Amino acid sequence: MNAPLITAPHVEPFFFDVAPGTRFCLYHAPNPQLEPRGTILYVHPFAEELNKTRRMASLQSRAFAAMGYAVLQVDLFGCGDSCGDFHSGRWDQWKRDLAAAADWLDARDSGPLHLWGVRLGGLLALDFATTRKVEAIVLWQPFLNGRTCINQFLRLRLAAGLDGDGPGAPRSTAALRAALAVHGRLEVAGYDLECAMVGAIDACEAINLKPLPCTVHWFASGTPGARRLAAGAARLAERWAPLGVELHFHPVDGVPFWATSDIAECPALLAATASVFARGAP
Amino acid sequence: MNFSQRALRFSCNGNSLVGIIDVPERPLPRGVLVVTGGPQYRIGGHRQFTMLSRQLAERGIPVMRFDRRGMGDSEGEPRSFDRIDDDIGAAMREFFLQVPDMKEVVIWGLCDAATAAAFYVGTDARVRGLVLLNPWVRTPQGAARAMLRHYYLARLGEGAFWKKVASGRLDFAASATTLGRNMKMAARDRGQALPQRVVASLAAFDGQVLVVLSEDDLTAREFSRLMARHNVRAKRIDIRGANHTFASAKWRSQVAEASANWIMSW
């Protein structure tokens, strides 16, 4: 007797017209053998972390789809396969891209909208959720402070030693920020940063955001600094509770796949994320 | 010239692969297939391959990029660069389906993708040219040994390096992991078959070859020595000051310009 074929639908890659230009998208249709559970919009990280996390994003997208969710991955303006130069990317444009992507998902599939943001994409998702009602937000190793993200990124230029050891060479992120303000642009690790882009990222802090009522699941590598992270999560949970935002912190063991030199997978994070969704509504 | 972009999904031994093709309004009969290697998926480090494709397509060259199995958006399990002939073959099939008037293809690859391309050409007569950037000709063991010698051990006595570590300016966890892995691989060194395989593949190839080497890159230096030792027949271009992945707009535009000019020169 032949076993029934399990027909997991394949991913659909496509270009989506959103002014200005086009965005590259991947749509993962929900498992047709299950009751549809809603939609999930993926928000990718910044610069090279987008590349490094692509495999994990792909694995988790397929896992969500297999559970009955419709998943959309969109490359934001100036990123990945979407149009535009990297330096033309803007925080506000990225939020407009997410709005267009969320509308597309709403029109195509039924059920509540969820956001899933990785690294700086986590902060962008939280900011987006201050104006768009969502059911839940999944954060993977998020930056909760845009300035921290930019500082870490600027350190790549200091570490590369491109500026030499001369007396005028920038030796701190503050000096690089000053150079950026003077020249308007600064190349870091192959990416052209732009003053207005950095200004908007710097200005965004989770503690000052007021997301609309939803549940937030924050997954973070438990080491190092698990206690400090948990304390930060507790502060944020307290701040958001009156708004109807319920925050859960999930420490996870695993490699820092967003920063490893080779592509790494973190099965513990996939499992932890799946278990939150397997329990029912996240 | 205007060009259109198409997102593709095609199959390789039962796995779905994702690719992008940039098709000029009036495509030239010679296309470029970008093969990716190392930790990169089809957009390339700092989007090098996305931007390269657009620059070549503006000059009339159809370009396809894709993720091999287990990378980026493609299904399947990750595999090493010397086992991706089927993936490249599947992409070639799709490329000719998408651009029916295309007659031949140049494969463009950086690092171990360049090596994979050199291995592939012997199996497919439609490939008439190779653009090889900083080709990887070191066995993992040999490379690990070179890395230890040139990088980590040299830096053990270096004050600035340790200051960098202390100030948090170096991703120490990642470096320590790499160091450990390199030591293990160096211990397993059993020979140097890879350079000979690459030389033999290139000697057997009757098409055109362009080699692009970065000035500031150990991998490129190793290949340069190999070229001299074995009289590898290829046009060579050196990019001054460039690092292994061409992490600056200036170097990337030199690479794109040199690639386009060379591809249109024969």
Image (tube, coloured by chain):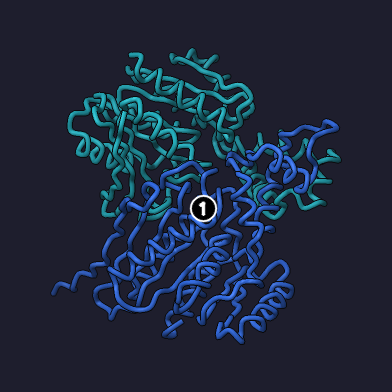
- Residue B121, percent from left and from top: 33, 28
Q: Name the residue located 33 percent from the left edge and 45 percent from the top edge.
A: B19
Where's the N terminus of chain A, which quadrant? bottom left
Q: Residue at x 48, y 37 (%)?
A: B48
Question: Residue B6's spot in the image, x, y percent?
Answer: 29, 44
Q: Is residue B182 above or below residue A71?
A: above
Q: Amino acid at mark 1?
A: Leu
> Which residue is nearer to you in this view: A127 or B207?
A127
Residue at the spot of label 1: A50
Q: Is residue B125 among what the camera can see? A: no
Residue A119, given in percent of the width and then of the height, sits at 58, 61
Classify 10 Å Cα crowding around label 1: few (below 14), some (14-19), many (20 and above): many
Q: Residue at x 45, y 44 (%)?
A: B80
Give the colour in which the image draws chain A: blue
Query: Which one is nearer the viewer's eye here, A125 or A263?
Result: A125
Q: Is residue B202 above or below residue A199?
A: above
Task: Left or right? Give the position of B154 relative to A119.
Answer: right
